[in-house]
Image: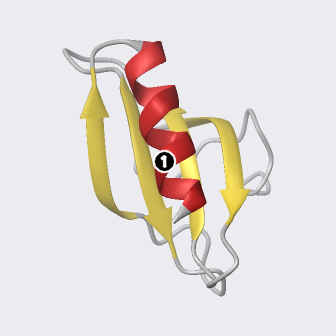
Amino acid sequence: MTDPTLPGAQLPNGATVIALAQRVDGPIIYLTVTEGMHPYATWQAPSGCPTRTHWGHYHSSRSDAWQDFIERAAR
């Protein structure tokens, strides 16, 4: 498996990482793309286990997903 903290990596859930941010309070926030009706998603993962993604927010457009990514990373 490639390093999940690098853009272009594939996560265990099948999503490909577009961007990521490490929040000050610990979690990693991912912006990902997959196949499907809502191909873009943001995910949160604990800093100590970057492949354990949870709390997904799904989006049909990249711009909506990007805005969600920015907001989640800033929390």
Q: Is residue 28 left or right of residue 15?
A: right
Residue highlighted by disc 1: 71
- Quadrant showing the N terminus: bottom right
Residue 20, given in percent of the width and then of the height, sits at 68, 48
Give the x, y percent position of residue 62.
46, 15
Q: Residues within 10 Å of mark 1 (few under 14, many from 20)?
A: few
- Whether residue 14 is visible here, answered yes or no, is no
Residue 42 versus residue 49: which sits nearer the camera? 42
The residue at the point 19 percent across, 15 percent down is 37
Under circle 1, the secondary element is helix
> Which residue is depicted at the point 79% across and 57% down?
3
Q: Residue at x 51, y 35 (%)?
A: 32
- Toward the viewer: 11 or 55? 55
Query: Would you place residue 48 above or below residue 5 in this image?
Result: below
Residue in front for this viewpoint, 26 or 8: 26
Give coordinates of residue 39: x percent, y percent. 34, 20
Residue 27 position within the rendered picture, expressed as x and y whole percent measured from the top left: 57, 75
Establish if 16 lies above or below 11.
above
